Image (tube, grey):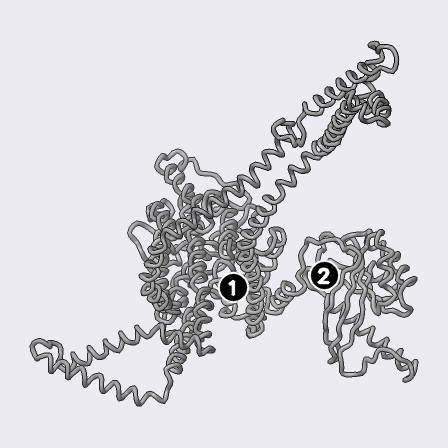
Amino acid sequence: MSFVVDQVRRIDSQLDRLQLSYTKPGESFSITAEEAHDPERAARITQLQFLIKNLSTTSSSKAALLPVKSVIAILDEARISASCPTCVQSFGQGEEEEEDTEGEDGFQNLQTSYEHELEWLLLSKATTQAYGEVLNTILEQTIPLEDDIWYWDDILTTYRYAGLYSIQTSPLRLWKWSQEIYHDVRSRGGAAPLANGWRQFYGLVKEAVQERSILDIQRRVVSPLAMVRNEGRRKRAALKRVRMINANALGILLGEGLSNERLSFHEEGLQTPGGFGTQENRHRWKSTIAKSIALMDAVVQNVRDSELSVDKFDNAVAAFTQDDHYYELHEPSGERAASTLKPVDVAQRLRNLLTVGLGNYSSSFSVAVKENGKPSPLIRYWLPASLLLVSSTTLLRILLNRKEEILTWIREFGTTVIDFYTNWVVEPTKKVIGTIRHDESSEVAILSKKSLEGDRASLERMVVDFAVAHPEGSALNERQIADIRAKVREGDLTPVLKVYEKDLPNPVMGAIRGNLISALLIQIQKTKVDVEVAMSGIDSILKSQELLFGFIGLTPGVLVSIGVYRWLSGLFSNRNSLQKWARQGQLLLILRNIDRILVGATPTEFGEIPYKDHGLLLCEVHLLRQAASGVLPRRIFHDFLQEIDELVDVRSGLERQQKVVDRIREDSFTPSFITTIGIDFKIRTIELDGKRVKLQIWDTAGQERFRTITTAYYRGAMGILLVYDVTDERSFNNIRTWFSNVEQHATEGVNKILIGNKCDWEEKRAVSTERGQALADELGIPFLEVSAKSNINVDKAFYNLAADIKKRLIDSARNEGPAQTGVNVGEQSSGSGGMGGKCC
């Protein structure tokens, strides 16, 4: 949404609150019984109401600014004529022109019909749309001129760009030179080479070329680059003239058009349901609409005049409007316009303005830009395009010769990517999911489940059989065998080892009997079982960490995927970051241009900037608003729009507009804030008594939990501002507490000042100025009320405190004598001071 859309919506909302002049002030609007019971007139009223709704910006389904074709179509569909009852009675049938003296008296006492007032309301809505369309057309065509001007600035300031432009435009100069040769030969009688002979025609061409060669020799004192720069200087001047005239037109439309009539709408012009107007000025809004149509017509007619200079534009528009009947009828009461102008005539003129006037302006502007703007893309890029076209055959041949290699590389690359994600991302992910679900196929194992059980059972049988075969006494019973089995499970092979120990002294006999060999085989089986038990323990550990190993297997694929994603996102985000930095740089550049416009403007006798500078300011503000919408958050941007509206308002005066720019660029006040956490800090340099002084401003937190931190900053401060909110009684009552803290922790004799903030919010004021002054007198410190939002007395507060600090330091230096060290404020150098600020 642009500034023009805001203006159209504001004017349209005032028209929506308009009371039609048929009713007396205070009465509700109603249709007469005659109009309600007449089917033809009722249908006509319904049609007009529908068309008015289509022209309104409050309709959610319609755009705020309708296209020109839509406005013209609505005017044609309305079929406004002079056959309504009011027109018949006021103007008479067939009388197109008559004296207005008697007509005004009769019209003042005549009750206008609902249909007649609806026609005027429809024309007002259409005029509002036309006003927005004219503003938007001039604005959208003026802003791109800056790029063309920058293009010629580059050519004028850089030889490299000048040489490049010379090469780019060389085909045009060659074509122009060939045309001059052709026309010269034709003027010398060489129009029919076949009739006069090719020899004579060739001689004429040779003679014309030789003459131009002599002229080129005479002009060799001027380099080709100088000729190019001269051309650029001429075209840049023409574009600047067009830009300044368009800016002047914008300033006039904003200063004299519907945008500047909104106070009249609220007061007496466009009456609101509250009854702001009186019966005598009930037709003023019609006069305002007629005046606006005349003004737009005058601006559109003069802005396309190529011979008109910038200084004479205002006078040309004024002369055009003085001879305009619509403009002469503008008066506070509006009776002359209502009694003289027919809605059908107003509709026809508005239609001509949109079709003929605005169309001719667009055409003339396009011609001027085509002649003096930067060359077309075809001219600027024909050289690289030609090189690309020439080398395209070579590139195509290389691609065809290596077609199979390229296709193979693409296939292998795709296969590699697919295999990587299948084997290192998909499969490990499936295994992790299977582990979570206790899927047997996904379990990690290094030993078969049945292996340990079989070997252990075999060992038990071997030991039991050995013990039965070699009992120590009588034969073993079932109980003893069961005990042996239990001991074997625990790793105890006592029966076997006893026999083995007996056979060791006579190993040969043990070997012959087979006891020794059996014992060795049982021990081997025992070793195997022990190994399997150990492996079973390791297997249990692996199973307990199975999910961990699954994620470890998935990690390489995830890391590679994250790396590729970050690389690709960084590749595109770097471009977005560069675009964001470019927008922020554009904001600074636009603010500098705005400041340059305001500084260079010469205010009028009313303190306002001229229309020319106002138009340039509007162009820059439009760009500032578009750039800020993509950088600032939504809530901050909403507050930023308030600053923009105040900056564009020409009636606020040059001084106030400059303060708004300073507030946007440096102080950046917004109604939304963040509570100070601990300490906030800012440095500002001011000029005091001809010397530059650097102020180190410390803003301390007001919350109790930061009290121990903030009191440490009191001791080194040279000046302290005690700030309270005039709309908050509690903050005012806390001043005594803060003052006692300052007296306790700050340096003796430190300068202090009492500040009451938000002094511009009178409707919310809770602490009067008298109470603030009384408290300051009680504490023995100066007092000042300020407004950070409206920039009231903010600079004065810091300047006064800095001056008091300087005076105290000078007096202290004089009293203590030259031997005492301190701050030397008498030297012609910058000083620095610390100020502690408290906002409670």
Q: Judge left or right: residue 164 versus residue 646.
A: left
Q: How far, Cα to Cα, is label 2 from label 1?
A: 27 Å
Q: Is residue 235 visible?
A: yes
Where residue 319 sits in the image (x, y, percent)?
40, 70
Q: Report the residue at 73% width, 52% height from top.
A: 764
Q: Report the residue at 31% width, 65% height from top.
A: 390
Q: Secondary structure at mark 2?
A: loop
Q: Amino acid at mark 1?
A: Leu
Category of crowding for the residue at label 1, using alpha-carbon neighbours closer than 10 angstroms: few (below 14), some (14–19), many (at least 20): many
Where residue 839 sits in the image (x, y, percent)?
79, 58
Residue that protrudes farthest toward the left in the picture: 195
User: Considering only vertical position in the picture, is 559 above or below 755?
Assistant: above
Q: Quadrant of the C terminus?
A: bottom right
Q: Amino acid at mark 2?
A: Ser
Where residue 705 sits in the image (x, y, percent)?
84, 51
Numbered tag placed on residue 296 in the rendering = none
Residue at the spot of label 2: 787
Residue at the spot of label 1: 618
Q: Secondary structure at mark 1?
A: helix
Q: Of residues 311 and 450, which is closer to you in this image?
A: 450
Label 2 vs 1, first from the N-terminus: 1
Q: Of residues 359 and 765, which is closer to you in this image?
A: 359
